[in-house]
Image (spheres, helix red, strand yellow):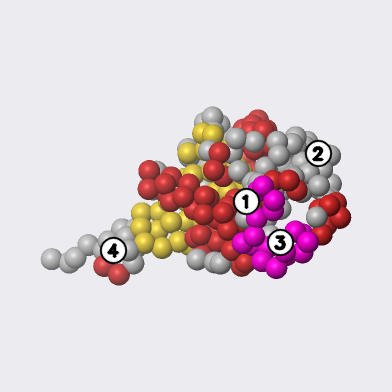
Amino acid sequence: MTPVAPVATETRWWFVRHAPVVGMKGRLYGSSDVPCDTSDTEAFTGLAEKLPADAVWMTSHLSRTHATAAAIRAAGLNAPEPLIEPDIREQDFGEWAELTWHEMEHNEPDVYAKFWEAPARNAPPGGESFADVVARTAKVVDAYTAKHTGRDIVAVCHGGSIRGAVAHAMGLTPEAGMAVVVDTLSLTRIDHIDGGLLRGKGSTWRLLGVNHPATGGAPGGYMR
């Protein structure tokens, strides 16, 4: 009798960074709840065409992710109401929130200089480090992957948390994770493959695309 080849189970993560924020140019807004601009109809139509409707949807607790998810649905995607997952929020910059880099350096030059000795692992005063963001994002990704194995999961969130998810999946250091570019309204895709390795055992992550624009063609595996 011919043995049956093991079948891998794929859990597909679709990350969308929120729409551009309003009134914060040059300022480090981080986890501050600031509004966003959802007027780019073409971008939202493009995302609605690429993203799966039959998926687990989530946003952070920040309003810009809610507005972005709502705009994608309004563009023609019949997706469910998103779950609210606070741990995929943007990095908390503490006392530096909503300041410019010049203001941070001017206010506390010694603290500012110390931070830049290891910017991926040092936390701003009263805030959290990027390494902290990677750790809490990883917990969400692992928990939802285990709970919704074999499903599509759409996460409308933030540049920092998307970098954190990619760093976790690819086994990157926080320093390497910070180098990942994630533009507003871009699409990033990672898949968790369970049972597709030697004799159907083990699991791994697969990176399909990072920072893909909302409009235009999609790389292999993106289209539903």
Helix, strand or loop for disc 1: loop
* Circle nearer the N terminus (1, 4): 1
The reply to whether discs 1 and 2 touch (Cβ–Cβ < 8 Å) is no
User: Residue 115, labelled with which disc?
Assistant: 3
Please name the residue that numbered disc 1 is placed on. Answer: 128
Q: Earlier in the sequence, mark 2 or mark 3?
A: 2
* Observer able to see residue 42: no
Three-letter amino acid code of the residue under disc 4: Gly
To which residue does mark 4 refer?
A: 200
Q: Is residue 56 above or below residue 205?
A: above
Which of the marked residues, 1 or 2, is nearer the chain's N terminus?
Answer: 2
Q: Nearer the viewer, residue 88 or 156?
A: 88
Residue corresponding to mark 2: 22
For marks 2 and 4 on the same chain, the one whose residue lies earlier in the sequence: 2
**The N terminus, quarter of image:** bottom left
Q: Earlier in the sequence, mark 1 or mark 3?
A: 3
- Residue 84 drawn at (x, y percent): 54, 34
Magenta region, residue range: 110-128
Q: Nearer the viewer, mark 1 or mark 2?
A: 1
Pointer 4 local density, CA inside 10 Å: few below 14, some 14–19, many at least 20:
some
- Mark 1 or 4: in front is 1
